[in-house]
């Protein structure tokens, strides 16, 4: 995957990446280019999004790690605008799926249709053709994903894990890159459905979008009512996204960081031999192995985004909450006592002498 000389990830046609392993010099150069690209992306996103710095950082980590993110926040916090603006800055195709109770799996993946075509000589020929659904885009926004029944939510499972869909016995590959950014409204319960654990586990990070500060809200009110349309230009090519995605798994990570990620993940399981009393009382099921995998991969992506040649313990600690909170299944006692998943993770952190803030 040695990038060609004078490769610019800010523009230009998509080039085919080489399968050869890069030299250490090329690797470090690609890390530097990744950091520059992330800086340029933040600059472009700031044209449309005011504030939400930590949210943008976590979205870029998700992008580099080739994962999927669940954005949780009340309406009106620009979650949809954030995803669509990111697609524009990357020059990628964007698809939006509005999840509703009557949405069917075929409305997402597509379906086989019977067409009549002219076979010549006045004859009509019937043939089956696949009509692609809105999931066949590079960046897909699953808007209010918890408003559709689990049967329809399950239509995303194969797509998110294998990056392909199977319809009528035929498997269709999705575009490359392909990533899902889903939104969930945390305040409305009527007409919503819980996300299955298997669905939640497919998300690399759960990102909480908070209210803006007073200063930011003043700027939002001023800018969005001026009639001006923000101009977002493409600063990273599709090839750049692919190359950075191949780079992230090769980023070195210290053994101490990997050990900490695994120990924290295992400490969330009530079945563990050395379980904490609070975990045993409030947690039904803790994070599985995909939790520690996601935590390490996200730490590597964060290091790449910051131009660091390796990931360490600090990167792990900073991503524990967004990487693990949605993987915990709490029991009825937790709801009765007002204990949240982030509270459990803070308790687990104390065991290892580390602390973190909600992200």
Image: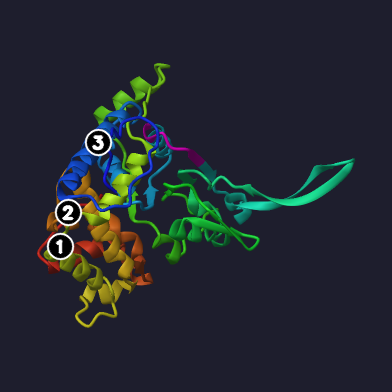
Q: Residues within 10 Å of mark 1 (few under 14, many from 20)?
A: many
As measured in the structure, the alpha-carbon distance from the residue carrying label 3 to the one carrying label 1 is 34 Å
In the rendered structure, which segment of residues is drawn in magenta? 89-95
Residue that mark 1 sits on: 257
Discs 3, 1 touching: Cβ within 8 Å: no
Q: Is residue 184 in view from this perspective?
A: no
Judge whether residue 92 is colored magenta. yes
With respect to residue 137, does 45 lie above or below? above
Identify the residue shown where x is 15% and y is 46%: 25
Q: Position of residue 218 (x, y in %)?
A: 30, 25
Q: Position of residue 275 (x, y in %)?
A: 22, 78
Judge whether residue 280 is colored magenta. no
Q: Nearer the viewer, residue 186 or 64?
A: 64
- Looking at the image, is mark 3 or mark 1 earlier in the sequence? 3
Instruction: Answer with left or right where residue 349 lies relative to residue 81.
Output: left
Color encoding of the figure:
rainbow
Q: Residues within 10 Å of mark 3 (few under 14, many from 20)?
A: few
- Looking at the image, is mark 2 or mark 1 earlier in the sequence? 1
Q: Secondary structure at mark 3?
A: loop
Q: Secondary structure at mark 2?
A: helix
Q: Nearer the viewer, residue 132 or 358?
A: 132
> Of the numbered discs in the image, which one, if any, rests on residue 315?
2
Q: Secondary structure at mark 1?
A: helix
Residue that mark 3 sits on: 5
Identify the residue shown where x is 68% and y is 53%: 112
Instruction: Answer with left or right where residue 218 lies relative to residue 229.
Output: left
Identify the residue shown where x is 38% and y is 43%: 16
């Amino acid at each position: 995957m040695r990038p060609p000389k004078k490769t610019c990830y800010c523009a230009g046609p998509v080039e085919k990446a080489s399968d050869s392993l890069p030299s250490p010099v090329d690797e470090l150069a690609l890390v530097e280019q990744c950091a520059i690209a992330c800086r340029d992306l933040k600059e472009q996103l700031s044209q449309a999004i005011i504030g939400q710095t930590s949210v943008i950082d976590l979205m870029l980590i998700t992008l580099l790690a080739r994962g999927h993110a669940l954005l949780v926040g009340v309406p009106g916090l620009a979650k949809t605008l954030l995803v669509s603006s990111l697609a524009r800055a990357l020059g990628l195709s964007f698809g939006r799926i509005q999840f509703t109770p009557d949405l069917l799996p075929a409305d997402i993946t597509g379906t086989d249709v019977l067409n009549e075509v002219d076979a010549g000589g006045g004859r009509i020929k019937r043939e089956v053709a696949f009509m692609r659904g809105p999931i066949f885009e590079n960046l897909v926004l699953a808007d209010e994903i918890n408003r559709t029944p689990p049967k329809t939510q399950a239509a995303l499972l194969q797509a998110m894990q294998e990056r392909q869909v199977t319809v009528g016995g035929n498997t269709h590959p999705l575009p490359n890159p392909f990533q899902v950014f889903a939104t969930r409204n945390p305040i409305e319960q009527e007409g919503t459905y819980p996300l299955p654990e298997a669905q939640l586990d497919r998300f690399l990070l759960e990102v909480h979008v908070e209210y803006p500060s007073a200063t930011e809200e003043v700027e939002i009110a001023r800018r969005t009512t001026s009639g001006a349309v923000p101009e977002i230009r493409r600063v990273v090519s599709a090839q750049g996204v692919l190359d950075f995605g191949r780079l992230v798994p090769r980023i070195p990570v210290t053994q101490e960081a990997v050990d900490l990620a695994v120990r924290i993940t295992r400490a969330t399981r009530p079945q563990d031999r050395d379980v904490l009393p609070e975990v045993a009382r409030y947690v039904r099921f803790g994070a599985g192995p995909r939790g520690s995998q996601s935590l390490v991969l996200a730490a590597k992506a964060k290091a790449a985004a910051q131009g660091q040649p390796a990931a360490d313990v600090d990167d792990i600690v900073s991503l524990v909450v967004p990487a693990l909170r949605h993987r915990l299944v709490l029991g009825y006692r937790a709801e009765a006592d007002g204990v949240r998943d982030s509270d459990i993770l803070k308790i687990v952190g104390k065991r290892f002498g580390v602390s973190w803030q909600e992200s």
